[in-house]
Amino acid sequence: MTAQRDRGTRVATGRRRSRREEILDVAVGLFASRGYDGVSMDAIGAAAGVTGPALYHHFKGKEAMLAAALYPVSESLLNGGRARVAQHADDPEAALAALVDFHVDFALANPAVIALHLHELDRLPEQPRREIRRLQRLYVEVWVSTITALRPELTAAEARVLAHATFGLMNSTPFLSVEVDRSRSAALLRNAALAALRA
């Protein structure tokens, strides 16, 4: 289920995806549904319709696939968050709403990637893992500065607690019921996140 919901949604640019991106989408879906240890390179190749040599032409191994899935996501979240705050530099209320909309859209489009972040990030070697963690911390601080601008009674540490709690709420998409359509799920997540942050 997770793979089907996720496939083809990570990059909505309108261009045709490369073979490498198609293989990565397949790998992400398999990692999320079966776990990193439950998926072999042969299984990824079979699911993607790629032979072994062609698969290794694109990726050296599973670790490389995992890094290729997680690093760009952390980078794009940071850049996207900064851009939305910059659009509302003089209005922290609007900036916070824009951040919530941005992250909810991401979370609904990428449940398998979120599942990988939650369960498989520690599989990576130290250097890429540390770099991804660094990008994640910077993204959190975008939220912290926006929250404290809106709610000056909070310390940065308190705002950080709220930000992480809200991420937990918005990043629940791998576990959401498919009985609720996407637009309604987005509205529920958005309203819950804003209520938690504004309080």
Image (cartoon, helix red, strand yellow):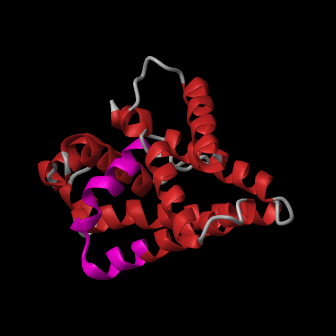
Asked whether 185 or 36 is in front, the reply is 185
Q: Is residue 79 visible?
A: yes
Please give left or right for residue 39 compared with residue 141 in the image: left
- Residue 155: x and y in percent read 60, 70
* Residue 176 vertical placement versus 93 (above, below): above
Q: Residue furthest front?
A: 153
Please give left or right for residue 165 compared with residue 104 in the image: left
Asked whether 35 or 164 is in front, the reply is 164
Q: What residue appears at the point 14 percent right and 52 percent down from the top-left corner? A: 40
- Residue 36: x and y in percent read 19, 54
* Residue 152 vertical placement versus 173 (above, below): below
Q: Magenta stretch: residue 142 in it? A: no
Q: Is residue 58 visible?
A: no
Q: What residue appears at the point 48 percent right and 72 percent down from the top-left corner? A: 137
* Residue 166 vertical placement versus 72 (above, below): above
* Residue 127 vertical placement versus 80 (above, below): below
Report the quarter where the N terminus lies.
top left
Asked whether 86 or 124 is in front, the reply is 86
Asked whether 143 or 180 is in front, the reply is 143
Q: Residue furthest bottom?
A: 127
- Residue 105: x and y in percent read 59, 43
Q: What residue appears at the point 69 percent right and 64 percent down from the top-left corner? A: 146
Q: Which picture quadrant has residue 77?
A: bottom right
Report the span colored magenta.
110-133
- Residue 133: x and y in percent read 40, 73
Q: Which picture quadrant has residue 92?
A: bottom right
Count every numbered label the image shows and give the total: 0
Main SS class of the magenta portion in the image:
helix
